[in-house]
Image: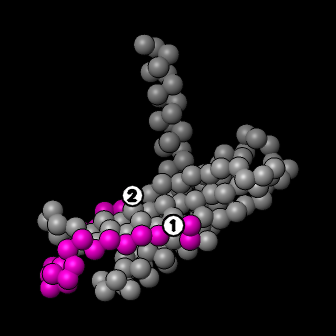
Amino acid sequence: YTKDLSLEIPHAPQIFLERENPQIEVQLHTAAGQVDDGVFEVSVTATVTAKLAEKVMFLIEAKQAGIFTVRNLPDSEMEPVLAVMCPNILFPYLREVVSDVSVRAGFAPVMLNPINFEALYQKQRLQQQEEAVAATTH
């Protein structure tokens, strides 16, 4: 389900007279929380900023969430399921919402590139391990 959605066009209507293609910046964030025993809410949030030079054409913030029931899984395997598998299920829906909102706002569709949530998860784990080592050596 789409949990949160916002669109800002701070320089409308003048921005619609611009003919240049904007620079698109995308930030992604995932989150997971336990709702009940074996029931989790997982969300993927995208913040899409379209800029011409330093002027913001539009800003889309969309959060796609899902309720997942995960049972009979060891705790050691729970984190990868919530951080990789569930976001992989949600991402196509988030991608569609972002594209649809940009078109309905009068702009070209924004198609989010596929995301490797496994690689993001591994990178975050490595970063956490490095921070833990750094904290114990100081």
In-front residue for pair 114/93: 93
Quarter of the picture containing the N terminus is bottom right
Local secondary structure at mark 1 = strand
Where residue 11 sits in the image (x, y, percent)?
20, 74
Amino acid type assigned to the residue bearing label 2 in the image: Gln
Crowding near pointer 1: few (<14 within 10 Å), some, many (20+)? few
Q: Is residue 78 left or right of residue 52?
A: right
Mark carried by residue 96: none
Q: Looking at the image, is 115 positioned above or below residue 30? A: below
Q: Examine the rendering and report whether any part of residue 63 can be seen.
A: yes
Q: Is residue 91 visible?
A: no
Per the model, the C-alpha gap separating discs 2 and 1 is 15 Å
What residue does disc 2 label?
27
- Label tally: 2
The three-letter code of the residue at mark 1 reads Asp
The magenta-colored residue range is 2-27
Does residue 114 show up magenta in the picture?
no
Query: Which residue was labeled with disc 1?
Result: 4
**Quadrant of the drawing holding the C terminus:** top left
